[in-house]
Image: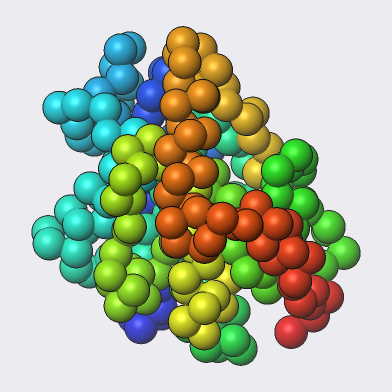
Amino acid sequence: MPPCGPHVCAVVLHYGDPGLTDRVQRQLLEGLPPGRRADIRVLDNAAPEAAPRAWRRLPENLFWAGALQWMVRYLQENEPNFTHLWFLNNDISFATPGPQLLRAEARLAWLESRLGTVGVYSPSVLRNPYHPQMIQDSRLQIREVCYVDGIAPLLNLAALSEQGGVDLRGNPYGYGVDVYTSLRQHQAGNAVVVDHQLAVRHTYHSTGRRVSGFMERAARAEAAYLSARLGEEYASLLRQLQTRFTDHARL
């Protein structure tokens, strides 16, 4: 990796099945040079069943957005050598060959040499019932979009800081925070990129559906959060934004 290139910390957020977390961690570590293995971490979000190889265990469940905010602040205050945070759900698995961390860093450096600052970079997804702009088309290199699904966003920490960090006010559960965080980067003029040459599989709501009432509470909080920031017609706006993208078969 060039000295001035991206230096990514990859964090798997653990809640639910430790086997899922272990699978993502093992995929990230596969083929990675020993000197980079410490850049792959598991953050245990006070899960009822602890992750056996966790780097940190939070004292309480901060949900997705709270854990993201905690991790961003930790890196900025304690390990400023990292330029980017790759924040990964534990219910994904990689569908393209690795080493994933080195591949993402190389792709990101290549993209920034052509597009300028990439505020948010994300793998594409083999299937996505909510965000069609994320679905992989292997004929493409990348797709520039308005916002991404937050299952595996790779965030430029300096660009995020310029926008005031992670805004989760009024939304402890975090649904919608991924959309708004990436949309703010697009609005600021930074590229928001879906990589069609790096893809993941995702099992949607694999943990949330198992917690009684969680999905309903999270949906109400998301609606209030997004309507306060994007207006009462936010759902219609987001559907329109899903169709506003630029495909690149080559750069």
Residue at figure coordinates x 65%, y 52% from the top left: 235
How far from the left and from the top, in percent, is residue 152? 52, 48
> How are the colours assigned in the image?
rainbow
Instruction: Answer above or below: position of 129 versus 225.
Output: above
Q: Residue at x 15, y 27 (%)?
A: 59
> In this rendering, would 245 be left or right of 123?
right
Query: In front here: 232 or 50?
Result: 232
Residue projecting furthest to the left: 78
Q: Could you tell me residue 213's position as x and y percent?
A: 47, 15
Count of marks, rendered view: 0
**Residue plotted at (52% across, 85% down):** 189
Residue 158 position in % (x across, y down): 31, 75
Q: Note whether residue 125 is visible.
A: yes
Q: Quadrant of the N terminus?
A: bottom left
The answer to whether residue 158 shows anywhere in this view is no
Which of the pair 99/145 is nearer the observer?
145
Residue 79 against residue 204 in the figure, above or below: below
From what the image shows, is residue 193 above or below residue 34? below
Please state, as top left, top right, bottom left or bottom right, where the C terminus lies in the image.
bottom right
| Residue at 62% across, 57% down | 233
x and y percentages locating residue 31 in the rendered image = 51, 46
Taking the image as shown, residue 135 lies to the left or right of residue 190, namely: right
* Quarter of image, res 133: bottom right
- The answer to which of 201 and 185 lies nearer the viewer is 185
**Extreme-right residue of the structure:** 139
